Amino acid sequence: MSDSVISVSELTRRFGATTALASVSLSLPGGAVYGLVGANGAGKTTLIKHLLGLLRADSGSVRVFGLDPVADPVGVLSRIGYLSEENDLPGWMRVDELIRYSRAFYPAWDDGYADELRHMFALDPRAKITTLSKGQKARAGLLIALAHRPALLVLDEPSSGLDPIVRRDILGAVMRTIADEGRTVLFSSHLLEEVEQVADHVTMMHQGQLIVSAPLDAIRESHRVGERVPSLDEIFIALVGMAAAPARDR
Amino acid sequence: MRSPALAIAWELRQRHRWGLLAVAGYLLVVATIRFLIFGPSEPVLVNSARFAAVVSVPLTTTFVYLLAVFSFGFAGDLAARQSIYPARMFTLPVTNAALVGWPMLYGTAAMAVLWLAARLFAVWPSGIAIPLIWPALLAAALLAWTQALTWMPYGLPGIRLIVAVLCLAALDTVVLLAIHFKAGEPRMVAILAPQLPLAYLVARVAVARARRGDVPDWRGRSARSGEIADVRPRPRHHFSSPGRAQLWFEWRQDGRSLPALVGLLLPFELALLWLAKDAPASIFEVLFLALLTPPFMAACTAWTVSRPNPQARDSYGLPPFIATRPLTSGELIAARLTMAWWSTLAAWLLVLVATPLALEWSGAWSVVIDRVRRMHEAIGTPRAATVVLLILAAFIVATWKQLVQSLHIGLTGRAWIVKGSVLLTLTLLILLGPIVEWIIDSPSLQRALWHALPLILAALVGLKMPAAAWIATRLDRSRLLSGRALIAGAACWLVAVLGLYGVFVWFFSTPFVARYVLALIAILAVPLARVSAAPLALAWNRHR
């Protein structure tokens, strides 16, 4: 699909005897917020690492903006804002140094927006990263992921480290803004309530396989029981239970 | 497993089982060499290469490894203010005495076993009188103090290393003085035995403080002086390119280590000029030592590239923060190579500024000037100046080479490659001594080697050039480097080889060494294959 921001075809990845991704195929058009959900170890981070070119596919193909992220890391990474689950910002940098360093890599870096985000996140420019709290580090990571207004924002478990109020307000606002501008957001989480609040489209993973990938409304509609629309939590548990059943039977 | 003592022992053993097995195997190989090759009754002289091979190198390596194992040095950040004692163990329902006592006891036992094994396998029965107890006590005391001082929380980052080095050096000095004054075993035991309970008490205080989160913070004092500087408008210039930004990153992260280490060592080395000013030969020995410092320290700092990051999930892998920079692997390597140049130049700037000052202040200048004058009279000014400049250039290039030649190992991000290369280096170090001694002892072997030298050099070139060609092909196919960059790199390498060859021809114009031998040496001396392999190693690490 030519208008797909992300196109994954028959992607398989093994780590020793463990199959982390098993023939995953996915096509995500631009301009929406995609939630990637699944239990711990479902393969969310492995899939995201393939999109960033940090992992090479054993078989199948990965295209982001129509490019292979392993063959053309600059072409892909310059259009992506990424907040890592590990949040490994260099501890020796000060916040202003992190901003100055990061802006060199992105021609579209918006100084005004970076300043606005820094004030919104209450980050002291002279503070060293190592002295920041976990939540502040996540905010600093989010700042450099957002300030170049990326065409694709990838957030890997962004909720970890942010307190509930800030998490809901900031992430909701950011994602909506980016989606409104025609940009794309892919975020992984195992907190389904959070996904329900902001995602237009949900992809569920279980044991390295996609069990569903559809618009959130369509998923809800398809699981409606009379007048009652089940929560994403309930839908996930029902689908994962179905996916796990054949394995148990075996 | 019902006791904390067994649980702690199990953790230490399980976590380091491969390393400890490797150490055991290593000592076994040394013992085999000792008994089967040298012969059990052959004396091992203290100043011989054989002594280095069968005693010094294995003993020192194993000692350092055990030091790191029992002080939890592999898991902690030595430069941090916080204790390196694993914080997760503070929540165990055991007393501070147990947390401190068991690792200390196991460490002491390991050090004693190490000494007894070394004494038994490597030295005994050579007929040399070797003390039985005090060296084991010294090793145990050094470990106990390392544990106490590294487990202590400090007020400033980096203080731990300084305090530990100073205290351990003080203990070493006391022991050296005792040896100098020919103290017997009972007196040495009397000096060293109290160190263990003393270190235990300090370690208990350290762990108790760390456990209750009592970490002093003196950064406020240094920050206050920093605030005065912060009143001034901070320069906010932007980097002109991503490459410049990455170069700045590399410099800030790793580039300052070499100049800092050289800056720390140099004053102590140059201080020897005051002692040696009446002995011209000693002055030149000190100067040679100062010139050797940057390449030697570069070889040490080069390994920091492959140091594991205990905080990261994949401790040897490239951090996602760097891996997701929109730069090619070639550009990331270029920044590192350039940083290595800056680091080299900064270290040499220190040497070139400090050495003349020390010569002047110590009054040793006249000796150096006299030697230079004699050289000028013997070979003329242009040749003398060229010799000095070439020697200096050789040292500078050697420093840079030391910094970059192991990049292709460290950047792979594979623990088995990094650890394997360390093991290989240590094995070569063990074998090097006996081989050198064997060659020195055998004039017929020396003659055979001299005759075979062109063949050996040709074989090495025969290995190097196809390896470089294969790497260039891989770089081209994977598009890590453009065709233009590859051709430019090859052209630079060729120019360097031709230049070095010209220098060799100019210097060694003798019928005893054929020109083609000089060409082969020049080809081998200029780095090519290993440096070229660095982008491949990085790409392999970055795209796993």
Image (spheres, helix red, strand yellow):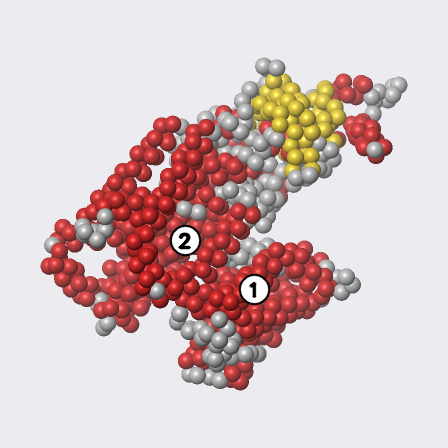
> In x, y percent, where is residue B447?
30, 59
Residue B207, located in which quarter of the rendered image?
bottom right
Provide the secondary structure element on which disc 2 rests: helix
Front residue (pair B316, A175): B316
| Callout in the foreground (2, 1) | 1
Front residue (pair B527, B209): B527
Chain letter of the residue beneath label 1 in the structure image: B
Q: Is residue B392 visible?
A: yes
The image's mark for residue A78 is none
> In x, y percent, where is residue B401?
36, 47
Left or right placement of residue A11 versus residue B167 in this view: right
Give the residue at mark 2.
B299
> In x, y percent, where is residue B531?
40, 41
Chain letter of the residue beneath label 2 in the structure image: B
Disc on the earlier residue, 2 or 1: 1
Residue drawn 46% across the image and 34% down it: B329
Give the residue at mark 1.
B28
Residue drawn 70% across the image and 22% down it: A201
> In x, y percent, where is residue B523?
31, 43
Q: Is residue B435 above or below residue B308?
A: below
